Each structure stands twice: as structure tokens, then as C-alpha cells.
Image (tube, rainbow, N blue to C red):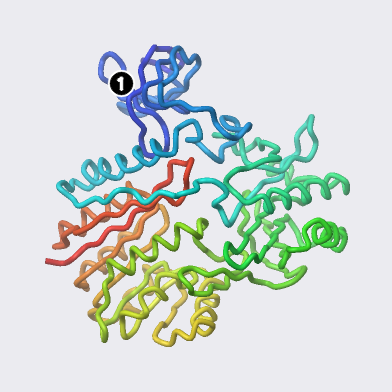
């Protein structure tokens, strides 16, 4: 099979990353974009990598019985959702299946206690943070929305979105309208001209706080006063407007400078009756309601050992550390982002939690200095890349009796858990949690006990 060849296939199952899997007549595995199990389709080969093929559907001959109409009119064009064409119960089924198979095939772990995935009662309007990108379109002019699926140079101009609240949708519309009326242009990575990059909206699920973060290529923004008046007139419930400056060529909502334009520099929300304050660039779980379940799971697995010590690596604004605090004498948190650490310290004061201690820096560098010689529990909640090899080796050397691993990537989770299992740890429980309905992302919590 060569790139450009077409072949008729029946798709079999879904892989990590959301692509469907099929086999060619001679047994070669092919990953197919935008397909779901049961589809019979003509697939064009787009790429070959070693013994694997990648393709796209060019003609859907017979749709799968699993397919349902997508709720969103932009589905298939916008890159924000991948699985709206699947009933939510089937989404949960495939995510559960992927966790099981990944731990078996990559982690070489079998006969595990894997609980049923924790889904949502209402899998719509769940995001408390949404990021839209500006783009200059030759026909439509200035657009604001999500990138086209698989493209970083094209943006779908969105007027609706069912992942975020209606308040957020209104704000994005106000931002787009104002910038069009002012004839502002988006920053171009090709010409390095233009000022607008992104708009990020964050809101407190339980507090109602509402932050708008405008990301630009420079701090000079002569229309800022009018921008503030326009937004707050349309949405008087806005509590914060920030300006983030990103002078680098690469498109990112993370910048080098933050300027408070209106209201407060932070917003607040509560999770399990703990109040959190966080800034524009601080990490906070995107799905507040599911985060409550996630942290309750970590808390339950951790149990509690009064007089003992717990460590929360990649601690963000302190959410897991605070949930551990009632069961331990001392809890240490380690986090790279300085703003998040400052938020965590203020959150501890606000909630009158006195037995937590936060440290700022790279986890793999700070771990040897920060960790007590023999903590009773270490909780790790790393980014998608998993625990850094140096950090994992150090955790294995100090050998805590228990490790709770919170993961947003089953593949790196399985890789790391395999090493821990080879070093004397036994997996006692696995709990998948669906933090991102209608996408292929999966959160998983694993409890490991040292034999």
C-alpha cells in the first residue's frame, strides 16, 4: 500500500487519539481519521510510518449503526470535538476499553481491578475555560473560533459551542464584533504583523466569576478603554479583564506579560467546599463538576495516615494537596508555574489549611531537595508527557509505601506504571474519569502499593 492508494475497509474500533482502527487484507494496521467502529468506507492512504498506515475517509459507503447526528453545526470542520457522532454511553464504553487495553498492551498489566468509568449526568456546557483564536480570512475578514481539525493555519468562525456556557459564547461574540468594528487584525506568524492572537474566557462554576483574557502580540492597544466598556456593557457580570502579551512568533495563549485591565486579577471557584483563587495562566481543572469527583477519588485512595507525610507533585494551585491535608500531618506541593504556587499559598490561607507547604520549580530538579526521606504517600498528576524519567527514578529510589498516579494520557500512564510495577509496586485499583465528553481525552487514577 502506497500513499494515495484507496481501499475499501470496515472500521473495527477506536484508538487513543480518537482515530478508528482497521486492517488491510494483508493484516497491516491502518488508523483512519473521523471514522467510528462499524463504518464501511473507501479510505485513502495519507501517510506510512514503519509498519503502520494512516488514512482518511473519502467515501462513506455504509455508516455505522453507532452513528448519531452531531448536535453542533460545526462538527467535522471544527477541531474542538471528535466524538459528537457517538452516543455518550458509547463514548464511555470506548474510553473504558482504551484504558484496559493500554494498561495491558503497553503496561503489560493484566487482571487489574478497573472500575467503570465515571461519566457525566449532563455532558454539555461543562467547560469552565475556553480558548478561541483570531485569524485573518481572505473572504470573511477577522474570524474568531477554533482551529480547523488538523490545521493550525485555519480557524472556524464559531457562533455556537456546546462545550462551554452560553455566557462564554456571548463574550466571544462581543470580542469578535468589537474587533471587527475597530478594523483590528489578527497576528500573522508569516508576516509577524497584526495584534490579536486569542481570547480566553474562564468562569467560576459555583461563584459566577467571569474572566476575559485578551492575548495580543504587544501591550500597545489604543482601543482598550473602549474594549472594556463594550464588553462590560454587553456582559455586566464580567469580573475581570486581563491583557496577556505574547511577543514570540509561535501562537500560544501563554505570554511573557500580564496586565490587569479591569476588575480583579484572579477569579474564584469552589471544589468540594474548598475555595480556589487562580490567575489567567494558572492551571485549574477545566471541568469543575468532574474535578470534584476526581479529587474525591484521590482522597479515598489516599486513605489517610494521621501523623504521616504526603507529597503532591505537579500540584498546580493546590487542589489535590488540600484534599490530602485532612488525613496527613504535613503535605508538600511542587509546581513549576510561579503564579500557580502563589495562588496555592493564598488558597491555603483563605481556607485556613496550615499543614501544606508549596515549592516552585521544575519537579525533576526540586524532588531530591523537597521530598522528605520517607513520605507515606506521593501523588503525581503530570502533564501528558507523563513523569519525567529522572523524577520517576528518584521516586523509585525513595520507595514510598503508596503512590497515587493521576493521568490525562493512558499511554504515558501505562509506561510509567509498568516501571513502578517492575520496581515492587502493585496496582490495587484503576478508576477512569471522563473529564472531557465528546473528545477522546481520558483521565485515570491509579492506586499503587509497595509490596
- In the rendered image, the residue lying farthest to the left is 451
338 left or right of 228 in image: left
Judging by the rendered image, the residue that carries numbered circle 1 is 23
x, y (%) of residue 196? Answer: 75, 50
256 left or right of 354 in image: right
- Label 1: few (<14), some or many (≥20) within 10 Å? some
Which quadrant of the structure image shows residue 93? top left
Image vertical order of residue 16 relative to residue 427, above or below: above
- In the rendered image, the residue lying farthest to the front is 121
Image vertical order of residue 252 relative to residue 368, above or below: above
* Element type where label 1 sits in the image: strand
Q: Quadrant of the C terminus?
A: bottom left
**Viewer-proximal residue among 239 and 208:** 208
Q: How many marks?
A: 1
Asked if residue 104 can be seen in this view, the reply is yes
Identified at 51% across, 35% down, the residue is: 84
Identified at 66% across, 56% down, the residue is: 201
Identified at 54% across, 46% down, the residue is: 124
**Viewer-proximal residue among 296 and 178:** 296
448 left or right of 433 in image: left
**Viewer-proximal residue among 211 and 109:** 211
Which quadrant of the structure image shows residue 31? top left
Q: Quadrant of the N terminus?
A: top left
x, y (%) of residue 282? Answer: 55, 66
x, y (%) of residue 46? Answer: 46, 22
Which quadrant of the structure image shows residue 328? bottom left
Identified at 55% across, 31% down, the residue is: 70
Asked if residue 369 can be seen in this view, the reply is no
x, y (%) of residue 186? Answer: 75, 45
Image vertical order of residue 274 relative to residue 206, above or below: below
Amino acid at each position: 500500500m502506497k500513499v494515495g492508494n484507496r481501499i475499501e475497509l470496515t472500521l473495527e474500533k477506536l484508538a487513543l487519539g480518537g482515530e478508528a482502527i482497521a486492517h488491510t487484507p494483508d493484516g497491516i494496521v491502518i488508523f483512519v481519521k473521523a471514522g467510528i467502529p462499524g463504518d464501511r468506507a473507501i479510505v485513502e492512504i495519507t501517510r506510512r510510518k514503519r509498519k503502520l498506515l494512516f488514512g482518511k475517509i473519502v467515501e462513506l459507503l455504509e455508516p455505522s449503526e453507532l452513528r448519531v447526528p452531531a448536535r453542533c453545526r460545526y462538527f467535522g470542520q471544527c477541531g474542538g470535538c471528535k466524538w459528537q457522532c457517538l452516543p455518550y454511553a458509547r463514548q464511555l464504553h470506548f474510553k473504558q476499553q482504551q484504558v484496559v487495553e493500554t494498561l495491558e498492551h503497553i503496561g503489560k498489566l493484566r487482571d487489574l481491578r478497573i472500575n467503570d468509568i465515571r461519566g457525566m449526568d449532563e455532558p454539555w456546557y461543562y467547560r469552565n475555560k475556553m480558548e478561541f483564536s483570531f485569524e485573518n480570512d481572505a473572504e470573511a475578514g477577522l474570524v474568531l473560533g477554533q482551529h480547523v481539525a488538523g490545521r493550525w493555519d485555519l480557524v472556524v468562525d464559531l457562533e455556537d459551542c456546546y462545550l462551554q456556557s452560553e455566557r462564554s459564547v456571548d463574550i466571544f461574540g462581543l470580542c469578535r464584533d468589537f474587533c471587527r468594528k475597530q478594523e483590528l487584525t489578527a497576528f500573522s506568524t508569516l508576516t509577524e504583523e497584526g495584534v490579536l492572537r486569542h481570547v480566553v474566557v474562564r468562569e467560576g462554576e459555583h461563584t459566577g466569576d467571569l474572566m476575559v483574557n485578551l492575548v495580543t502580540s504587544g501591550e500597545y492597544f489604543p482601543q482598550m478603554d473602549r474594549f472594556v466598556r463594550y464588553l462590560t456593557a454587553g456582559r455586566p457580570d464580567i469580573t475581570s479583564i486581563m491583557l496577556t502579551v505574547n511577543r514570540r512568533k509561535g501562537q500560544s495563549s501563554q505570554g511573557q506579560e500580564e496586565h490587569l485591565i479591569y476588575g480583579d486579577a484572579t477569579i474564584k471557584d469552589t471544589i468540594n467546599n474548598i475555595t480556589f483563587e487562580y490567575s489567567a495562566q494558572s492551571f485549574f481543572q477545566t471541568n469543575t463538576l468532574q474535578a470534584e469527583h476526581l479529587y474525591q477519588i484521590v482522597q479515598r485512595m489516599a486513605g489517610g495516615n494521621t501523623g504521616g507525610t504526603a507529597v503532591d507533585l505537579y500540584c498546580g494551585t493546590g487542589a489535590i494537596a488540600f484534599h490530602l491535608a485532612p488525613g496527613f500531618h504535613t503535605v508538600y506541593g511542587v509546581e513549576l508555574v510561579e503564579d500557580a504556587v502563589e495562588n496555592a499559598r493564598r488558597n491555603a490561607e483563605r481556607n485556613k489549611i496550615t499543614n501544606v507547604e508549596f515549592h516552585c520549580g521544575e519537579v525533576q530538579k526540586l524532588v531530591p531537595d523537597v521530598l522528605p526521606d520517607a513520605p507515606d504517600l506521593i501523588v503525581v498528576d503530570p502533564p501528558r508527557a507523563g513523569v519525567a524519567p529522572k523524577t520517576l527514578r528518584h521516586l523509585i529510589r525513595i520507595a514510598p509505601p503508596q503512590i497515587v498516579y493521576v493521568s490525562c494520557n493512558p499511554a504515558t500512564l501505562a509506561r510509567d506504571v509498568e516501571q513502578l510495577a517492575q520496581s515492587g509496586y502493585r496496582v490495587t485499583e484503576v478508576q477512569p474519569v471522563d473529564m472531557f465528553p465528546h473528545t477522546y481525552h481520558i483521565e485515570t487514577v491509579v492506586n499503587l502499593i509497595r509490596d
